[in-house]
Image (cartoon, rainbow, N blue to C red):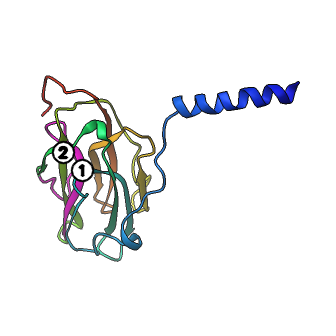
Amino acid sequence: MDIFLLCVFLPLVTVAWGQYSDYYYGPYNYGDNDEWVNVYRQGFNFQCPHGQVIVAVRSVFSKKEGSDRLWNYACMPAPQSLGEPTECWWEEINRAGTEWYQTCSNNGLVAGFQSQYFPSVLDREWQFYCCRYSRRCPYSCWLTTEYPGHYGEDMDMMMYTYDYYIRGATTTFSAVHRDRQWKFIVCRMTDYDCPFQNV
């Protein structure tokens, strides 16, 4: 009798779990052969293909290479419910050697990064490449934990949950370690057009 009940209820539990649990992204493809998008002490410009957004960020630190980092990013197509991007743009530059907080204006999602290294500060300036999807609005926003966990460590941030998107970041800069810690601003997006605009 116990085996019979198990055979009846196990498929029901499996179906319910599949319908109501969070969907997790699979492993990320960071591009061809997991190559870095930059070399130490050089600028770079990375943009996801049209209609895709950043879902993972990986980085390694080297003190001997000017306290700089190698960077790599993974992109994933935005769901069909968001539609195609209606416009994309570069946000304002965040200066090297300072702490900063920035979200994509106009309800945009992060679809790329641009950075330039400054040897006088041993740090980088940053710009987000943002794309807006129709008139969708963010909600349920939160900050991730710090990446990396400690200055000078490797960093591997991935969006594990479906329907959450990177909208920006806040960073702290250590003048002692000459490194940055990032907290990414992550939000869900509405499935309907919003009557207002975030700036």
Question: What span is colored magenta in the figure?
Answer: 93-118
Classify mark 1: helix, strand or loop.
loop
Task: Please give the name of the residue rendered at 39% of the width and 47% of the height, measured from the top-left corner.
Answer: 146
Classify mark 2: helix, strand or loop.
strand
What is the quadrant of residue 59 in the picture?
bottom left
In this image, 109 relative to 33: left or right? left
Mark drawn on residue 189: none
- Disc 1 to disc 2, how far (Cα)? 6 Å
What is the quadrant of residue 186 in the picture?
top left
Residue type at the position of mark 2:
Pro
Q: Where is residue 103 in the image (x, y as percent from the top left)?
A: 21, 41
Considering the image in quadrants, where does the N terminus appear? Answer: top right
In this image, 93 relative to 157: left or right? left
Q: Where is residue 64 in the image (x, y as percent from the top left)?
A: 35, 77
Q: Where is residue 178 in the image (x, y as percent from the top left)?
A: 30, 63
Q: Position of residue 10 (x, y in %)?
A: 71, 31
Task: Please give the name of the residue rendered at 43% of the width and 62% of the height, measured from the top-left corner.
Answer: 154
Task: Please give the name of the residue rendered at 24% of the width and 58% of the height, measured from the top-left corner.
Answer: 49
Task: Please give the name of the residue rendered at 18% of the width and 45% of the height, measured from the top-left corner.
Answer: 85
Q: How many neighbours does mark 2 have within 10 angstroms: few (below 14), some (14-19), or many (20 or more)?
A: some
Q: Is residue 123 above or below residue 183?
A: below
Queried whether the magenta region covers residue 88, the answer comes back as no
Question: Could you say which is closer to the camera, residue 195 or residue 68?
Answer: 195
Queried whether the magenta region covers residue 102, the answer comes back as yes
Q: Are marks 1 and 2 in contact (CB under 8 Å)?
A: yes
Residue position marked by numbered label 2 in the rendering: 85
Mark drawn on residue 51: 1
Considering the image in quadrants, where does the C terminus appear? Answer: top left
